């Protein structure tokens, strides 16, 4: 199999070097991600955007499989110091060939551009299979989810995660449940739960222009945004909408890994599709209550939804199913109401309480601000960076 080591940018022209117009005195952090940069703006984008103040960021996505025989890297610059690398791999390869080509492509790319990798940052263990031999000063495993519990998870994932934990210098976890599960395997595991960009979401507390597709939806309005997948409790939404035809439910986000035809179709459920991160405050400003209708199953056992503090920053009372990390963090908040999804009357009562909260927004704002005072992506970034520097300085002695 012939190896094509051309590097292509967004308009398919040859890219000589991505570092010709950015700070050459910054070292490189390469992030191995299972999430595409343009999918949903969440933890990886928040952190890598902030880490770009210290490093040139290479954000390596999972391969796209193509009919062509030649494999190549597509390079897209999204910000001054952040470049997305997307491998395009021939679909005719077996796994051993694919891994060899991925490693060769990345090696060739770093050599041609004279790149020294200071930090390897793994969001997924699956990429360790071919990238373990790449040299760096520090290896980070940022465990934001229990990926092995997700639908269609590779069988090797648990085994690779154990190898990654042994390889990593530092392990970060995205929630308390994950921290408890991982801390027994590594001596330097650190809890970094969901944070929030308060400045962005607090805009929703003001009167903002109403999006066109929201204008036709009457109040009371109960909203959710996020990925709609196996974690989403379809039956809970169906039962709520059927029981309370006077409530309108707004669902924002892409549908993945489940059949879209399985979603309930009722006149008071409004699927508005995927929206950009910048658009979210405009939608939130129209809602009375935000809710988190996650099913209670293996895929949600360890999650710590980022949307909870984002909803609160927007000034919305929240209703959630019995997610362990939400119970641990917000059970005494008075503005996050938690109910068992198997108990429909109790869940309806929780929404009723939240609707009452929404009539006293100043009270909600005050309580939300107290909860959020130590939650910010800036603080998370600074604390993570201190740990990385401390590790590197200790090794340099």
Image: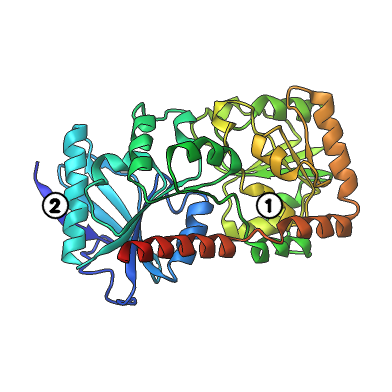
The mark that comes first in sequence, 1 or 2, is 2
Mark yes or no: residue 77 visible.
Answer: no
The residue sitting at the left extreme is 2
Q: Residue 161's spot in the image, x, y percent?
A: 38, 36
Viewer-proximal residue among 108 and 285: 108
Residue matched to label 2: 4
Q: Residue 375's spot in the image, x, y percent?
A: 65, 58
The residue sitting at the top extreme is 342
Where 310 sits versus 160, above or below? below
Viewer-proximal residue among 332 and 312: 332
Label 1: state its secondary structure.
helix
Number of residues whose C-alpha sits closer than 10 Å to that of mark 1, classed few (under 14), some (14–19) or many (20 or more) = many
Where 310 sits versus 295, above or below? below
- Determine whether, in the image, residue 337 is placed left or right of residue 47: right
Label 2: state its secondary structure.
strand
Mark yes or no: residue 311 visible.
Answer: yes
Instruction: Please report the residue visible at 23 percent of the width from the left and 69 percent of the height from the top.
Output: 17
Q: Residue 68's spot in the image, x, y percent?
A: 18, 43
- Determine whether, in the image, residue 348 is placed left or right of residue 185: right
Please state which of the two labelled residues, at mark 1 or mark 2, is closer to the viewer: 1
Q: Residue 63's spot in the image, x, y percent?
A: 30, 44
Quadrant location of the C terminus? bottom left
Instruction: Please report the residue visible at 77 percent of the width from the left and 41 percent of the height from the top.
Output: 331
Residue matched to label 1: 309
The answer for how far apart the CA atoms under marks 1 and 2 are is 45 Å
The residue sitting at the front extreme is 397
Quadrant location of the N terminus? top left
Instruction: Please report the residue visible at 15 percent of the width from the left and 46 percent of the height from the top.
Output: 70
Number of residues whose C-alpha sits closer than 10 Å to that of mark 2, classed few (under 14), some (14–19) or many (20 or more) = some
């Amino acid at each position: 199999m012939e190896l094509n080591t051309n590097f292509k940018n967004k308009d398919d022209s040859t890219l000589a070097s991505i570092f010709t117009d950015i700070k050459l005195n910054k070292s490189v952090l390469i992030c191995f991600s299972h999430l595409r940069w343009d999918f949903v703006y969440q933890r990886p984008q928040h952190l890598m955007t902030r880490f770009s103040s210290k490093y040139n960021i290479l954000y390596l996505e999972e391969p796209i499989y193509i009919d062509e025989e030649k494999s190549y890297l597509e390079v897209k610059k999204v910000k001054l110091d952040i470049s997305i690398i997307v491998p395009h791999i021939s679909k005719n390869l077996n796994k051993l060939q694919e891994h060899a080509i991925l490693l060769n492509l990345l090696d060739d790319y770093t050599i041609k551009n004279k790149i020294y990798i200071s930090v390897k940052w793994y969001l997924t263990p699956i990429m360790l299979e071919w990238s373990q031999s790449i040299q760096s000063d520090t290896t980070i495993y940022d465990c934001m989810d229990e990926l092995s519990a997700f639908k269609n998870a590779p069988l090797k994932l648990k085994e690779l995660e154990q190898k990654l934990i042994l390889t990593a210098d530092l392990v970060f976890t995205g929630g308390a449940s994950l921290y408890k599960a991982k801390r027994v395997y590594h001596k330097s595991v650190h809890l970094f739960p969901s944070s929030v960009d308060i400045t962005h979401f607090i805009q929703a507390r003001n009167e903002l222009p109403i999006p066109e597709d929201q204008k036709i939806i009457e109040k009371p309005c109960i909203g959710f945004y996020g990925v709609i997948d196996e974690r989403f409790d379809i039956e809970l939404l169906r039962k709520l909408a059927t029981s309370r035809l006077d409530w309108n439910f707004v669902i924002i986000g892409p549908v993945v890994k489940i059949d879209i035809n399985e979603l309930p179709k009722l006149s008071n459920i409004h699927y508005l599709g995927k929206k950009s991160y910048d658009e979210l405050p405009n939608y939130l400003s129209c809602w009375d209550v935000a809710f988190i209708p996650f099913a209670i199953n293996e895929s949600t056992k360890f999650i710590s939804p980022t949307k909870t503090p984002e909803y609160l920053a927007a000034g919305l009372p929240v209703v959630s199913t019995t997610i362990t990390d939400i119970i641990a963090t917000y059970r005494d908040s008075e503005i996050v109401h938690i109910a068992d999804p198997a108990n429909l009357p109790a869940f309806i009562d929780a929404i009723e309480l939240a609707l009452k909260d929404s009539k006293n927004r100043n009270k909600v704002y005050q309580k939300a601000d107290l909860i959020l005072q130590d939650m910010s992506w800036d603080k998370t970034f600074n604390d993570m960076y201190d740990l990385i520097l401390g590790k590197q300085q200790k090794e340099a002695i």
